[in-house]
Amino acid sequence: AVLPRGPYILLGWSFGGSVALEVARHLLEQGETVHQVIMLDSWARHNPRLAEPNYFKSIYHTEFSNYSVKEQQKLIARLHHNMRLLINHCVKPVELPVLLFKSEGLLREYQDYDDPSNHWLNILGRHLTVKRVGGDHQTILDSPQDAYIAEICHHHFAMINRVVRTQQETQ
């Protein structure tokens, strides 16, 4: 449901995780309450070679083989645009819990660029919790990973509810 006011829990996968973190930062600046950001295999830093159009196309051209050539070009252009945005974006720290689900399987463009926290630890520090999950970037929400992610999220939501109830009782 859409709430005109918080509190909020934001979730994003891949590019969406970075967007969720940025939205949370803006909400906090506006005085809103954000309890947590959950990121599904989002990265704080990216392989800089992905900004190069030819390298990017060489990586992703097979991803869209089911599409027409024109649709492939359009999708690759959109993804490359988003990647350039991510590479050029300066992520700022936020003072709120962030839960990162990191896939165990790495896409080939990240194998030489891997980091246990997908490079978030230096930015988020003690606010970051990392949970490793099976699958790779594309299959992180497939079964059985989906059940594991749901279980961990349920646990985090229950903790948040306990904290909120305790805060309400002391007011």
Image (tube, rainbow, N blue to C red):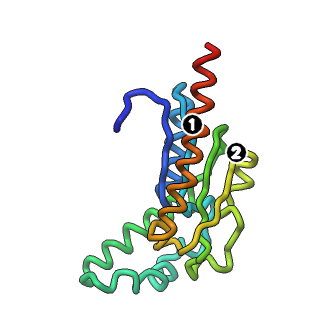
* Residue indicated by mark 1: 35
Vertical position of residue 121 compared to residue 141: above or below = above
In this rendering, the answer to whether 31 lies above or below 86 is above
- Provide the secondary structure element on which disc 1 rests: strand
Give the residue drawn at x 46%, y 66%: 141
* Left or right relative to 90: residue 139: left
Q: Secondary structure at mark 2?
A: helix
Q: Name the amino acid, label 1.
A: His
Image quadrant where residue 88 sits: bottom right
- The front one of 66 and 99 is 99
Q: Amino acid at mark 2?
A: His
Q: Please tell me which residue is depicted at 64% across the width and 79% down the height of the picture.
A: 111
Work out whether 104 lies above or below 163: below
Residue sticking out furthest to the top: 171
Q: Which residue is mark 2?
A: 127
Of residues 60 and 51, the one nearer the viewer is 60
Instruction: Name the quadrant of the N terminus.
Output: top left
What is the spatial separation of the Cα atoms under label 1 and label 2, in whole angstroms? Answer: 12 Å
Q: Residues within 10 Å of mark 2 (few under 14, many from 20)?
A: some
Residue 4 location, x and y as percent?
A: 37, 28
